[in-house]
């Protein structure tokens, strides 16, 4: 499993099989009910743990709600799965610091999720002004609990492609200064500016990077017509941003780690007059990351990104089991049936260069 050494001897292009420590997904939307039952196996078959986003309706804002949601996920795991959901608390302007600390100390949730109000799917209970949650952030800083940030400005006057960089400049910089010890994850980073601020604050800051932002740019959204299944928030940016994300992901730097942001929506919600934001990338996530690392001649650092950097940031042990990936073409099916509808899979219908093999102890 010393992948650096293995590649040193073989040369990356000779590698047809790659065994890495079992990865975790540090950002996923598992939803609830039938949707959760349908999408969960894609996460449990690849990842040992996942940070589960709290943007249900209503959002997960209390310890009791998080416990109950965790129980529903645990009950829905496929037979024999030892998958561990790591829960999060949805921050509102009413969230109490005591509630946040109780859930953290009792091991119910590992972090709080901060949505600027109206930034994305189910964010209407989010925060209008970061100053209003100052006391909660102070408490989190004191107890070492990370805040996971959807880093986009929500002022409709700000161009949608500038919302991340605008948020960094006008909100995040200040928050970083005001809370000098707060652990922060800039979720699903999409810009050069995002990568830079994370690097500058890498002693206590990190970013998750999605598979789709590594392969799509904003032109992809209009390739041959309007592509609702490529629409997510933050929206994919210009090519030079995508290149910066790829360099960050494959760099091996501890401040960048895997977070799929797999966000399923039924076909009716995607193919609508007003299409919901979110890409269901769960089924092809690890295959896509492997392909990107392969294309960047960096397979030897996939394990750091997927399996080591996240646990180290969260102060959790790495997994001991392994997963094997094969350089073997595999046709991904197009969609997943959910009730009487379906969810389109990211890269569905495509031949993937890498496929997932066995999980071993
Ligand atoms: C997510 C969703 O659908 O819940 N959508 C998305 O485009 N990523 C919410 C989020 O993470 O922004
Ligand atoms: Zn998300």
Image (cartoon, rainbow, N blue to C red):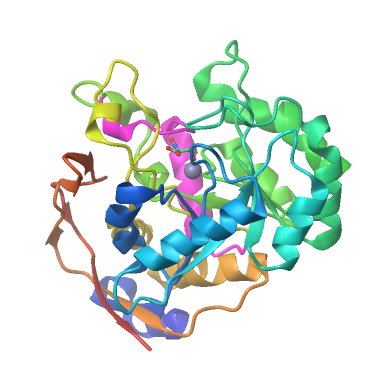
- Quarter of the image for the N terminus: give it: bottom left
- The residue lying furthest to the bottom in this view is 361
Q: Which quadrant would residue 83 be assigned to in this image?
A: bottom left
Which percent across, then down, holds residue 22?
A: 42, 76
Seen at 63% across and 49% down, the residue is 89
> Within the image, what quadrant is residue 163 found in?
top right
Q: Which residues are magenta?
A: 227-254
Tell whether 357 sits left or right of 243: left
Q: Quarter holding the C terminus? A: bottom left
Residue 189 locus on image (x, y percent): 54, 43
What residue is rendered at 60% in x and 62% in y? 253
Q: Residue at x 44, y 40 (%)?
A: 242
**Horizontal placement of 92 versus 303: left or right?**
right
| Up/down of 34 relative to 9, above or below | above
In this orientation, does residue 350 appear?
Answer: yes
Estimate the x, y position of residue 13 in percent, counting from the top left.
Answer: 27, 71
Residue at figure coordinates x 41%, y 51% from the top left:
30
Q: Nearer the viewer, residue 13 or 290?
A: 290
Of the pair 245 and 109, the residue shown nearer to us: 109
Q: Nearer the viewer, residue 304 or 72?
A: 72
In the figure, is residue 103 to the left or right of 98? left
Residue 181 visible in this rendered orientation of the protein: no
- Where residue 328 sits in the image (x, y, percent)? 16, 68
Report if residue 172 lies within the magenta region: no
Indicate whether residue 252 is drawn in magenta.
Answer: yes
């Amino acid at each position: 499993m010393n992948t650096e050494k293995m590649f040193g001897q073989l040369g990356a292009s000779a590698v047809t099989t790659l065994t890495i420590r079992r990865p975790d997904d540090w950002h996923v939307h598992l939803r609830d009910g039938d949707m959760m039952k349908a999408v969960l196996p894609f996460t449990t078959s690849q990842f040992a743990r996942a940070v589960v986003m709290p943007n249900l309706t209503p959002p997960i804002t209390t310890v009791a709600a998080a416990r109950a949601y965790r129980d529903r996920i645990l009950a829905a795991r496929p037979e024999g799965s030892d998958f561990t959901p790591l829960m999060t608390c949805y921050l509102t302007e009413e969230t109490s610091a005591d509630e946040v600390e109780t859930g953290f100390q009792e091991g119910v949730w590992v972090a709080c999720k901060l949505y600027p109000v109206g930034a994305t799917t189910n964010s209407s209970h989010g925060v209008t002004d970061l100053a209003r949650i100052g006391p909660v952030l102070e408490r989190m800083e004191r107890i070492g609990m990370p805040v996971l940030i959807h880093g986009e400005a929500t002022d409709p006057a700000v161009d949608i492609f500038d919302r991340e960089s605008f948020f960094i400049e006008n909100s995040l910089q200040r928050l970083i200064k005001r809370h000098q010890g707060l652990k922060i994850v800039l979720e699903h980073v999409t810009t050069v500016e995002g990568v830079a601020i994370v690097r500058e604050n890498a002693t206590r800051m990190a970013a998750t990077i999605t598979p789709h932002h590594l392969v799509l740019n904003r032109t992809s959204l209009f390739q041959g017509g309007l592509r609702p299944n490529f629409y997510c928030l933050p929206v994919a940016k210009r090519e030079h941003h995508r290149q910066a994300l790829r360099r960050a992901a494959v760099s091996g730097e501890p401040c960048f780690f895997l977070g799929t942001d797999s966000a399923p929506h039924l076909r009716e919600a995607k193919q609508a007059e007003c299409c919901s934001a979110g890409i269901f990338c769960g089924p092809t996530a690890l295959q896509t990351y492997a392909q990107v690392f392969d294309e960047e001649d960096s397979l030897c650092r996939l394990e750091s990104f997927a399996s080591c950097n996240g646990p180290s940031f969260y102060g959790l042990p790495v997994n001991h089991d392994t997963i094997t990936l094969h350089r073997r073409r595999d046709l991904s099916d197009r969609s997943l049936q959910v009730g009487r509808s379906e969810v389109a899979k990211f890269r569905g219908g495509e031949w993937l260069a890498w496929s997932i093999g066995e999980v071993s102890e």
